[in-house]
Amino acid sequence: MSAYLGLFLTAFLAASLLPAYSELLFAGLLLRGYDPLALWAWASAGNTLGSALNWALARFMLRFES
């Protein structure tokens, strides 16, 4: 379970403001024999929530637009 959570967090960071490479972790976990569908689901969830964070930050920053 910790591998899936690590992939989720890496994908979340990669989709947000911080640079990260979730594809490398994804490929490594695939090579170690983890379930591809579960990896895809966890990575997709992390990417989606990271994108939602970016959207929310942009909406918040619009308040300071001059």
Image (cartoon, rainbow, N blue to C red):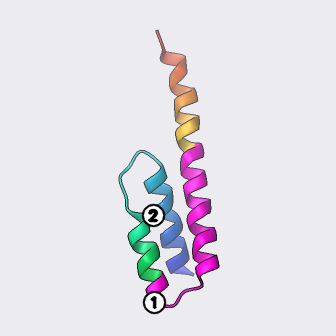
Tell me which amino acid carries mark 1: Arg
Give the labeled residue for mark 1: 32
Where, by quadrant of the figure, is residue 4 drawn?
A: bottom right
Which residue ends up furthest to the left in the rendered image?
A: 19
Where, by quadrant of the figure, is residue 59 drawn?
A: top right
Q: Is residue 63 above or below residue 25?
A: above
Question: In the rendered view, does 21 fall on the left or right side of 55?
Answer: left
List x then y, in percent, for residue 56: 58, 36
The answer to which of marks 1 and 2 sits earlier in the sequence is 2
Local packing at callout 1 (Cα closer than 10 Å; few below 14, some 14-19, many 20+) is few
Task: Report if the CB atoms under discs 1 and 2 are less than 8 Å apart.
Answer: no
Q: Which residues are magenta?
A: 30-52
Residue 10, numbered circle: 2
Depth order, front residue of 51/63: 51
List x then y, in percent, for residue 21: 38, 62
Q: Main secondary structure of the magenta part?
A: helix
